[in-house]
Image (cartoon, helix red, strand yellow):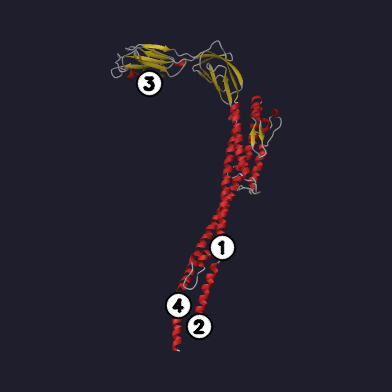
Amino acid sequence: MSTTNSLSSLSSLTDSIASSASGTSSSTTGTGLGQGINVQEFVQYAVSAQQAQITALQTEQTALGTQTGELSTISTDLSNLDSAVEALNDPLGALSAVVATSSNSSVVSATASSTAASGSHTITVTNLATTSSYYTNELSSSSSTISPGSFQIQVGSNSPVTITVNSSDNTLSQLASTINSQNAGVTASVIQDANGYRLALVSNSSGAQGDIKVSSNTTGLSFTKAVTGTNASLTVDGIPISSASNTVSNVISGVTLNLGSALPDTPVTVNVSPDTSQATTAINNFVSAWNTAIKEINNQFTVGSDGTASGPLEADDTLQQAQSMLLSAISYSISGNNGIVNLASIGVNMNDDGTLTVDNGTLNAALSSNYSAVQNLMQNATTGFAQNLDSAIQAINAPGTGILSIDSQSITNNSNDLTQQINDLQAALATQEATLTTTYSQVNDTLEELPLLESQLSQQLTGISSSS
């Protein structure tokens, strides 16, 4: 009787295991004596709660990663904005650029640096600076032999250099090479035309200081002076100027004059004024960078038609603070300054969403009629708009200290903590799965062996009954 009861209890155990799995997987509904169980499904069912916890943490970590990526994008936009603001604040930058224009650029053209003062200058060019040169008589070939002898080359007040023609250095090509190796202040070359080959000497310096003199010639060559080195002669605002070069850079402070031709009887006017083109470009670049940054921030708080926000940082209080700081800084205003007191006064207007739009007509008028006031609005050392906005951006975005930088690091730290939690849970889960797999495998083996055991016991019971 006791053996029969043991078989009945074992059968009940297998039915109970099968019943517990039948609610989660149809593949276990046939579990019973002799059929065994699906060990892997039983194990996954047993650890499903732990796996769900890990999955939830991984989902949270993914969300944090998305937030970190969005903060990185906003940080990059703010860095670009800061570069555009610094361009407005640079005392040697676009708002300090000046341009020089000429009434006759074929006679005089000019360039100006940021140190040049605005003004008008009258220039008359009497003659250009020339570069001295010599040439020799023609020979039939660049390798034709020249009679031995020597000659001297002198450039300006430099010491003469003696060139010797001998049996090993007696062709035009050889002489040109020798002269160029002497650092005599000239460049020698062999030129060819319809009449033959000649040696040409050209001074390395223009003007009287570079005038060439060839003397003491005892060779078979004859030298002809082609051009005498002379200084440029001009007047600048009535002041006579002599220049060894046709590039004159030390007469008008910050302005370089480039002489193109002589026109002794016709004065040329050169005007130096602020470069409104560069200023306009810099202001428009700033507006573009601002709009990119503020739109990216706004997108985090945009509410969809279903009433939900779509940005991953919609609940980020730090980003909301950054948005408020930027909008406050962009509205910055000063007093006086000939009415140029804020962005709107130069034609840069704010839209309802915080973006900016440029009224080019108003901007051009401000730059043309009140340039110094526009420059003062942007660059005043203590109350300048650009300095104020730069300070706000630094407080928001400075690496390590800006509020968004700290916010991003906090999110990264949270993500790292989740990584550790996930790793710990996965390690514990792996251990648990291994233990359960062993246990359920043993149950499976027992279930599969039960029919044989039942048969053997039945035979034994039958034998016992027969012997009775």
Find the distance from the CA under tag 2 to the CA under tag 4. Answer: 15 Å
Find the distance from the CA under tag 1 to the CA under tag 2. Answer: 40 Å
Q: Which residue is mark 2?
A: 2
Q: Of the numbered discs in the image, which one, if any, rests on residue 180? A: 3
The amino acid beneath tag 2 is Ser
Q: Which residue is mark 1?
A: 49
The residue drawn where x is 56% and y is 62% is: 49
Query: Which element carries disc 3, helix, strand or loop?
Result: helix
Find the distance from the CA under tag 3 to the CA under tag 1. Answer: 90 Å
Q: Of the numbered discs in the image, which one, if any, rests on residue 183? A: none
Residue located farthest toward the bottom when viewing the structure as drawn? 468
Q: Which residue is mark 4?
A: 453
The amino acid beneath tag 3 is Asn
The residue drawn where x is 52% and y is 77% is: 9
Q: Is residue 289 visible?
A: yes
Earlier in the chain: of badge 4 and badge 1, it is 1
Find the distance from the CA under tag 4 to the CA under tag 3. Answer: 113 Å
Earlier in the chain: of badge 4 and badge 3, it is 3
Query: Which element carries disc 1, helix, strand or loop?
Result: helix
Please state which of residues 125 and 180 is positioned toward the viewer in this rendering: 125
Residue located farthest toward the top when viewing the structure as drawn? 265
The amino acid beneath tag 1 is Ala
Q: Nearer the viewer, mark 3 or mark 1?
A: 1
Quarter that holds the C terminus: bottom left
Earlier in the chain: of badge 2 and badge 4, it is 2
Find the distance from the CA under tag 2 to the CA under tag 3. Answer: 123 Å
The amino acid beneath tag 4 is Leu
Please state which of residues 391 and 88 is positioned toward the viewer in this rendering: 88
The quarter holding residue 97 reads: top right
Tell whether label 1 touches label 4 (CB within 8 Å).
no
Find the distance from the CA under tag 4 to the CA under tag 1. Answer: 36 Å
Earlier in the chain: of badge 3 and badge 1, it is 1
